[in-house]
Image (tube, rainbow, N blue to C red):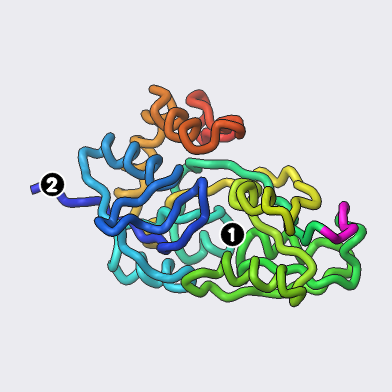
Amino acid sequence: MTQPLRLICVDLSAPPLFDKADPDGTRRGYEPSAAETIAAKLGRPVEWVVTSWGDMIPAVNDGRGDAIWCGQGITDERAALVDFTDPYAVFDESLLVRADTEITTAADLAGRRVGAIAGSTNMALAETFPGVVPVAFEGTDDVFGDMIAALRAGTIDGLVDDDVALVPVGDEPDLKIAFTIATRNRWGVAVAKGNHGLREEINAAMRASVADGSLERAWTQWMPNLTFPLHADSADTTQ
């Protein structure tokens, strides 16, 4: 019997990346579609292992899942704890603010409270804004919702996240995107430290999916307004 590819993620609403699972466990969005595309190349079905943001790395390292496929930016800090595949996505970062604010540039943030997920690439960017007061949000089951609620309540003045995650909420009447910075964050699949065999299997399947256009089709299905950032003639597959 074919062993499923057990992928670790959270169960929350963050379209178009992913949404809360259907009652039968089906997950929708770019990330589940991309994962299924790569798993199909391996001849393995996908089985989702649901956990919290803060528990994902411990979960993969203690064998509760085979890999993390859940919006993980490739950072030096995370790479010290897990091994990353080639990227399956590349995104920029944006600042979300209340619609009635006059914040339009990083210079407007001096003395302001800006939230981001603790230990994330988004927090690393927030900490570079001159005079900003960083507010770290721990990885609860709905950390994104926690940040949005804090922004609306005025507890924070803005929040940093990858542009794709902020597209839907940036259209809500009480919120807006203040600015976007072209940070080109690379997102990868994380496997347990030293699991080179699975890492290379996923890399080979990912490169094949870039080459035959199947990964781009998954991207375009969910994010038609964003240009697919990967190409087949580079070992790193980033532009």
**Percent position (x, y) of residue 63?**
28, 67
- Of 173 and 15, which appears nearest the observer? 173
- Of 167 and 32, which appears nearest the observer? 167
Q: Is residue 208 magenta?
A: no
Q: Is residue 101 magenta?
A: yes
The residue at which mark 2 appears reads as: 2
- Of 153 and 8, which appears nearest the observer? 153
Q: Residue furthest left?
A: 1
Q: Find residue 34 and report its image quarter.
A: top left
- Disc 2 crowd, CA 10 A, few/some/many (<14, 14-19, 20+): few
For badge 2, the amino acid type reads Thr
Magenta span of residues: 100-105
Of mark 2 and mark 1, the one earlier in the sequence is 2
Q: Secondary structure at mark 1?
A: helix
Query: Which residue is at a point 51% across and 50% down the rendered structure image?
Result: 15
For badge 1, the amino acid type reads Asp
**Percent position (x, y) of residue 58?**
40, 72
Asked whether the viewer can see residue 228, the reply is: yes
The mark closer to the camera, 2 or 1, is 2
**Magenta: predominant secondary structure element?**
loop
**Percent position (x, y) of residue 17?**
49, 48
Q: Secondary structure at mark 2?
A: loop
Residue 72 lies, with reference to residue 136, above or below; the image says: above
The residue at which mark 1 appears reads as: 76
